[in-house]
Image: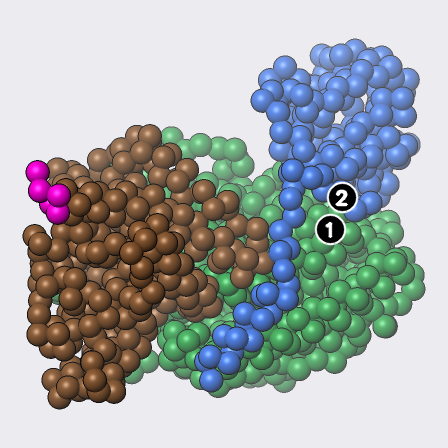
Chain colours: A green, B brown, C blue
Amino acid sequence: MAAQQILKQLQERFPGAIQRSDIPADNRLFVYVERAALKAICRHLFRDLDARYIVGIGLDDRPVSGSFIAAHNFAFDASHVLMSILVHADAERPAVDSIASEVPAANWSEREFRDLVGIQPIGHPTPKRLVLPDGWPEGVHPLRKDFPWDGVPAGYDEHRQYVFDEPPEGCVVVPFGPFHPTLDEPAHFRLYVDGETVLGCEYRGFMVHRAIEKLADSVLSYNEIPMAAERICGICGCVHTVAYSQAVEQAAALTPTPRAQFIRTIMLELERLHSHLLWVGLASHILGFDTLFMQSFRIREPIMWMAEKITGNRKTYALCVIGGVRWDITPEIKAELTRLLDTLEREWTAVTEAVSGDRNMQKRTRGVGVTDRALVKEVGLIGPIARAAGVPIDCRRDHPYAAYDRVDFDVVVQADGDVWSRLLVRVLEVFQSIRIIRQCLEKLPEGPIQLSVQDELPAGRMGISSVEAPRGESHHVVITGENNRPRRWRVRAPTYQNLQGVPAMIKDQQLADMTISLGSIDPCFSCTDRLEVLDIRSGHQRVYSQEELVQLTRRGGGR
Amino acid sequence: MDARLAAMIGYAILNVILVLLVAPLFEGVVRKLTAKIQSRQGPPLRQPYYDLLKLLGKEDLESGEVPGMQRAAASAALVVILSVATLVPMGGPAPLHEAADVILLIYLITLCGISTLLGALAAGSTYSLLGMSREMMTMMILEPLLAVAIVIGAVHTHSLRLPTVLNGSAYAEGAVPLAGLLMALVLLLALQAFVGRVPFDISEAETEIMEGPFIEYSGAKLALFKYVRMAKLVVYSALFVALFVPWGNTWFYPANLVLFLGKVFVLVLIVTVVGATHARYRIDQALRYYAGLFAAAMVALVLAVFGY
Amino acid sequence: MSWLSKLKETSICLQAGRVTLPYPAAPRPTPPRFRGRPIFDPAKCIGCAGCANNCPAREILVLDVCQEIRIIKYLGRRCTYCGRCADVCPEKAITMSQEFETASNDIHDLTQEMELFMGTCQRCGRCFTEPGPLEQLKLKGYRFDALAEEKWVGRSLAYLEDQPVVRDIDIELD
């Protein structure tokens, strides 16, 4: 259903609830609704129309409209539509109905905007603090416009402790993180272990929160934000810059030049290549198979050198500006890239053949960390996890961006939903990425690589963009503003959503499988921790407490 | 003093010094060869010596539950494994054979494992207790394998004396040495687990339980435990050599020594290559594997009783 | 068969041989587009502060000592080598060099300070045309970042010293 049809459906089903709607393009829909109808509309979208929940956003719109705004973003993958349902909340005591009981995937987003913006989700099943640190005083909400970006709240209580839930009977508490050899970034999984079996866990994150979103709306300007965006993640930097740039371009109705779109595609796929190869190495290392780890990294290294030749840096490409890219692909670079792809394909094929018959690896990965389609739908899992469970979602095909609508590729899907399936998905996606880059190099159009932007960008427009990161869908929401910077920028990294599936994955599994299950979602805690002012709110923001976990598994048919 | 007694004590001391000197070198070989397989340069062969020296000089943070028992356990583990070294022939005869028999050998090997368990228990952290439980499960099913090999030797030679049993006694004289060959294969397949290397280094799985039993150890105590790990490689290889490939010895001790080191080197190579090419198993998968080996060992024992 | 795949894996490894480079024992050359430490050329600089206005890390500070003298100071501490300063510089006075081995035990070794003699517009003091509307910070007028404390002060002074300080000002020119 295209955007028009979805709007019509909503208008028919909920007459009078729609205050205002915008359809800036046939694949984008913004609907402002009455507060009272929010829960019913979201439920209808999620359950009846089978939309996928992406993220919830809170924003302090008091300088402009005199109220707060809460929004929930949904995706219709089959119809290629991204939409947002928005409601206004009172300036004095902002509150909206919680949709988390209907849409489990919204649980963390609502806790996040409760912490950071102060919009209360009424009826939320677990209104626990998510992002802010324990000692943070009540009533102080960092993302409000009256809180300065370098503000320090009075009344910070550093001795206040976090109250963990009680472990179940007979379980030993095994603290996994914040320091652990497997984790690159700090995260805390409090595992409840009986012998060698994990019976539950509680997660705390947001330890690396860096306040990037606040910086973007207070200090940085449109063309500076990509430099901050690419530092959200230690691996998928390009994804965030492209997603942000696209969101702004969509909001301001700018189209990047065709050559720039192709170059963005090439760099995105290069990033996918190096990320997946890194993941295979990391997974092997977690399993104790250091040789495959070393070989993956050896095969991956020329990709990093190539990125350095094109952009000047191995990982922080500093690629995008609004309307284009900064680095061009010369004929020499094109020739070298072609040679690199040939070598890569050859070597990776050899490794794939060797690993696919390796029963030693398969014993550690088959049947481990299983997710089924039901969990994927409920929690909104994305990326290789969803594709390994048989759910064929891929933003490159479902919500085409950059040059993806002009190249051919397959979406790799497996059926078993375990770690081995995810490994296969990533290994096979490497070949698809090589195919895409080759096509882009062939079809690369001539022309400028940057748009000449003549006018200031109009304020108050909303742009949303979903980009397929190696880990899943990375979703950015930008509301343009005055003074050459956005009014609000919300980043939803894929690990944010995927971490919500981890407790169900590791329940009733062996402790030894915990790390590879966690590793199989390819977690990027920096992405999740994203940024908001000084909060420990991590992207994933969901501390799954014991009750939540039990509820989730009971709903999924567990014990 | 008796000449024989002096010789025994002399050989015992020689064995201990040999193990102390050579164990880090073989560890260096393991690391270097692993690196070559991984397309890297690897540390120099002398690196484990440097590591041990460095650790001995580092500050010892006593952060476990019972530091006194930690100290005792670390020292005990090294002392015990070196005592085992005095009972195993390394180029010469089994040195202290007049003072011990194979039963004591088995006990001492078990005692070394128990010292590690005590060390983990004394550390008291969640991860070390997890490592201890894994180590305990492993020990319970692995030590009997070694005991069965020795019992087979005892059954064939009708003796429990060290020089008799630790001299290829698993092979039956006069009949097809089925039990011996089977047991040799079993122990070769179990060697990786005895010396605690990938895929069977489950109790110290660094990426899963953060070094397991050794998590609360630093400085000199950690050096002792590292030394124990290195020494185990040499001592278990020596045991394997003594039980299954003891041939080629002459009266000339230095030549015997070189031959012995050569055989141990081959075993170290096998251990390294297997370690570099496998992923780590889970404890339940490993236990199933050991159980299979134990069943084969039982078959070998039955064969031995019947004279094969 | 697991043995076969292990053999295949091992043969892949052994064919590759040693791939680790001897850096730092041997130097490692960088590709031409490598973005290393930015080098500021005071001879070419016209003092427009475009670099300072577009530095995402706010590491380039600007101080107008008086109407004729402007100091532009590159601090280099949080510099991410993004190269935006070099992009927007109208005189190409900034080059992203190939240097990346910039470790030092004194952070001030990285500082580059330029004292510039400025021509003055009689009406507003300072104004320059940015390359595009997305490169402006809208800080027209005199700048007074705290060079001694190495702190960015996000404000500017209009016209003369006794004018009130404002956060962001927009001067209309007719």
Which residue is nearer to you in this view: A310 or B291? Answer: B291
Left or right: B211, with A270 as reference point: left
Q: Quadrant of residue B37?
A: bottom right
Check disc 1 and give the amino acid type.
Answer: Glu
Q: Are marks 1 and 2 in contact (CB under 8 Å)?
A: yes
Q: Quadrant of the C terminus of chain B?
A: bottom left
Q: Quadrant of residue B264?
A: bottom left
Marked residue chain, label 2: C
Q: Residue at x 80, y 56 (%)?
A: A324
Residue B195 coordinates in the image, percent (x, y): 30, 60
| CA–CA distance in space, label 1 to label 2 | 8 Å
Q: Quadrant of residue A105?
A: bottom left
Q: Residue at x 20, y 43 (%)?
A: B10
Q: Which residue is mark 2?
A: C30
Residue C91 coordinates in the image, percent (x, y): 90, 32
Which residue is nearer to you in this view: A373 or C4? Answer: C4
Q: Which mark is residue A32?
A: none
The total of numbered circles placed on residues is: 2
Q: Quadrant of the N terminus of chain B?
A: top left
Name the main secondary structure of what is drawn in magenta: helix
**What span is colored magenta in the figure?**
B1-5
For mark 1, give the secondary structure.
helix
For mark 2, give the secondary structure.
loop
Check disc 2 and give the amino acid type.
Answer: Thr
On whether residue A57 falls in the magenta region, the answer is no
Q: Which residue is mark 1?
A: A308
Tell us which disc is closer to us: 1 or 2: 2
